[in-house]
Amino acid sequence: MQSAFGWGALTASAVWYFLGSWFGPGAWRILFFLGVLPAFFVLYLRRKVRESEQWEEKRREREQLQALRRSGVSLSREQRIVAGFTLSALFGDPHLRKILALCFVMSLGTTVGFWAVSSWIPGYVESVAQAAGAPNPARWGGVAGILFTVGSIVGYISTGFLADWLGRRAMLRILFVGALLTTPIVFLWTHSPETVAAAAALNGAFTLGQFAWMAVYSPELFPTAVRATAVSLVFNAARFVSILGPLLSGFLITRLGGYSASALLFSSVYLLALCAVPFLPETKGKPLPV
């Protein structure tokens, strides 16, 4: 399911390729209009996709526990988590707060790593092609973007198999180390547009592919009553911070004289994410927390 993000990006790239050829500089307006259309599918989802049985059961339990609390009954820790407001339960319980903080650190590594480093790959490849005297440097930027997206799809799909085969924490280590190592391959050790574009596919498998851990691993760390809120916080809170990534990296690109130094500097965020992994529990083969 997470790979749908990659398929969507690949489809958008293909549509842009044809629209740009047919309509010229104003094609982006048409692409934006077409991009709105899939959102209407959400209306169908709201009508046809049912809530999970576990969530419905927990909702009924919450109502019962809230009634007991109003009557003056003292609730246990687990019952307070179910009965309470989800944000209060997450931040008020020491164990859940710790897990949330560790996941946030890893999410920060994933989102900042992509936006501050890998999102510059098309522009970097274009500059490499221009320096090499390629006849159409912009085309190489587009090729690199497509190959990066293809690599991300492979990464999305592979992450689930890695998690089941090696375990969740081993999967995380492979993703973060892979992203850390492939960054210098793209920005430092390859010098022709062909090799950089090929390296971009490998980088995409790790940097964008690692977004799948949030769908695979984080739901297994939180009980049903707060699971949706926790997973949303893990992903979206880090995205607000990662807004600064492209701004700061763009500033450093101009100050440091190119993409490479900025990319290598920001790729150190993967080391921060790696530091959080040993403190999280292994959930392979274990049932979802109730």
Image (cartoon, grey):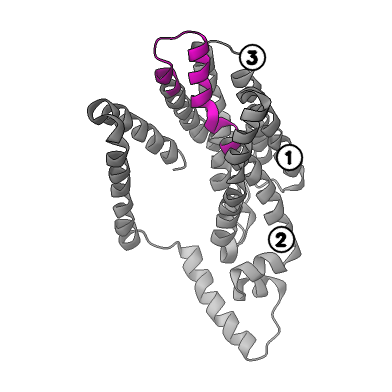
Is 38 located above or below residue 264 in the figure? below
Nearest the viewer among 163 and 102 is 102
Of badges 3 and 2, nearer the viewer stands 3
Instruction: Report x, y in % for residue 11.
Output: 34, 34
Examine the structure image and report whether residue 136 is included in the region drawn in magenta. yes
Q: Residues within 10 Å of mark 2 (few under 14, many from 20)?
A: some
Where are the magenta residues, as a range? 115-141
Residue under numbered circle 2: 97
Nearest the viewer among 63 and 288 is 63
Instruction: Give the quarter of the figure containing the N terminus.
Output: top left
Q: Disc 3 residue type?
A: Trp
Nearest the viewer among 234 and 68 is 234
Instruction: Give the quarter of the figure containing the C terminus.
Output: bottom right
Instruction: Report x, y in % for residue 261.
Output: 68, 25
Q: Residues within 10 Å of mark 1 (few under 14, many from 20)?
A: some
Q: CA distance from mark 2 to mark 1?
A: 18 Å
Of badges 2 and 1, nearer the viewer stands 1
Q: Residue at x 39, y 14 (%)?
A: 136
Q: Are marks 3 and 2 in contact (CB under 8 Å)?
A: no
Residue under numbered circle 3: 189
Instruction: Report x, y in % for residue 5.
Output: 43, 40
Q: Which one is earlier in the sequence, the residue at label 3 or at label 2?
A: 2
Nearest the viewer among 87 and 188 is 188
Q: Residue at x 47, y 69 (%)?
A: 56
Callout 3 secondary element? loop
Residue under numbered circle 1: 272
| Residue farthest along the front direction in this orientation | 255
Q: Which one is earlier in the sequence, the residue at label 1 or at label 3?
A: 3
- Disc on res. 94: none
Callout 2 secondary element? helix
